[in-house]
Image (cartoon, grey):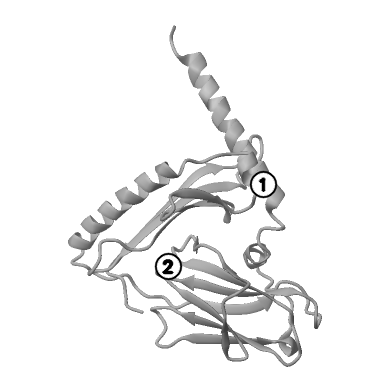
């Protein structure tokens, strides 16, 4: 894996708090683009989140909005064209930034990797292994699952890149599996900040509780804990916008 010549991120908070209570909920829009010296087109992402939990992202290749949970489109909508326009602007700004900085590459910060099961392990009972790569930059990484030394491609899902306030990123990979005593699983991580691939092992004898950090638990469980809070945040956002539009219409001179 080779390094990128430049990266540009946009982190934009859109909404804080609810009416009559301290500001506790934060809605934000996150977008980033990257490129190398050899190609002007590189990876990018556009995502909308509440309190760090993804609501939707835009598939930049298929040009469509992808909702994190099927309930979300019932409360809101988003046209992918708006995200594509923002990404185009970011790509142009990145080209300018690269020229002004003499093509200085982004700093490579290696990930911290944790592997853990979604729930307490019972042999022969279906479960999910979670591989969390955290606190890395830039947001380009490869997560691969191995079972007894053989790569596993089926029953694997990945999240998008989730940003942190320090401009580092996290990413999750999920492996649906049936634990057996003799099986050994590995999550192999490749990143430009690593001199060689990093491999984390898991087997049934290593079963331990989920990480205690609240953000890890929420992301690792696929937003099971935060669903209602996010939906209420979306509803509040929509109602707030409707109220603002109504107030503007009333204030317009006849």
Residue at 34 percent across and 73 percent down: it is: 107
Looking at the image, the residue that sits furthest to the top is 254
Q: In the figure, 243 relative to 103: above or below? A: above
Q: Position of residue 246 (x, y in %)?
A: 54, 21
Q: Position of residue 239 (x, y in %)?
A: 61, 31
Q: Is residue 114 left or right of residue 86?
A: right
Taking depth in this image into account, of 50 and 190 the one nearest to the observer is 190
| Callout in the foreground (2, 1) | 1
Q: In the figure, 208 relative to 181: above or below? A: above
Q: Is residue 238 left or right of residue 206?
A: left
Q: In which quadrant will I find the C terminus?
A: top left
Q: Residues within 10 Å of mark 1 (few under 14, many from 20)?
A: few
**Mark 2–mark 1 contact, CB under 8 Å?**
no
Q: Is residue 167 left or right of residue 34?
A: right
Number of the label disc, if any, that sits on residue 71: 1
Q: How many marks?
A: 2
- Secondary structure at badge 2 equals loop
Q: Is residue 52 left or right of residue 227?
A: left
Q: Position of residue 30 (x, y in %)?
A: 45, 53
- Secondary structure at badge 1 equals loop
Q: Earlier in the sequence, mark 2 or mark 1?
A: 1
Note whether residue 180 is visible: yes
Q: In which quadrant will I find the N terminus?
A: bottom left
Q: Which residue is mark 2?
A: 139
């Amino acid at each position: 894996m080779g390094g990128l010549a430049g990266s540009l991120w946009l982190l934009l908070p859109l909404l804080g708090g609810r009416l009559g209570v301290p500001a506790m909920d934060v809605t934000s829009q996150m977008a980033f683009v990257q490129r190398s010296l050899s190609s002007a087109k590189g990876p990018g992402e556009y995502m909308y989140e509440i309190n760090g939990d993804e609501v939707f992202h835009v598939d930049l290749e298929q040009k469509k909005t992808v909702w994190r949970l099927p309930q979300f489109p019932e409360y809101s909508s988003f046209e992918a064209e708006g995200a594509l326009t923002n990404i185009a602007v970011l790509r142009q700004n990145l080209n300018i930034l690269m020229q002004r900085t003499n093509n200085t590459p982004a700093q490579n910060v290696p990930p911290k990797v944790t592997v853990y099961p979604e729930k307490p392990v019972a042999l022969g009972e279906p479960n999910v292994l979670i591989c969390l790569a955290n606190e890395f930059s830039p947001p380009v990484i490869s997560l691969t699952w191995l079972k007894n030394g053989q790569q596993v491609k089926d029953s694997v899902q990945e999240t998008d890149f989730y940003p942190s306030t320090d401009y580092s990123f996290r990413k999750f990979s999920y492996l649906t599996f049936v634990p057996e005593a003799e099986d050994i699983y590995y999550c192999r991580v490749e990143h430009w900040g690593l001199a060689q691939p990093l491999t984390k092992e898991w087997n049934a004898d290593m079963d331990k509780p989920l990480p205690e950090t609240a953000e890890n638990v929420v992301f690792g469980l696929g937003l099971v804990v935060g669903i209602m809070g996010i939906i209420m945040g979306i509803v509040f956002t929509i109602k707030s916008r409707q109220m603002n539009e109504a107030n503007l219409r009333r204030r317009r001179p006849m």
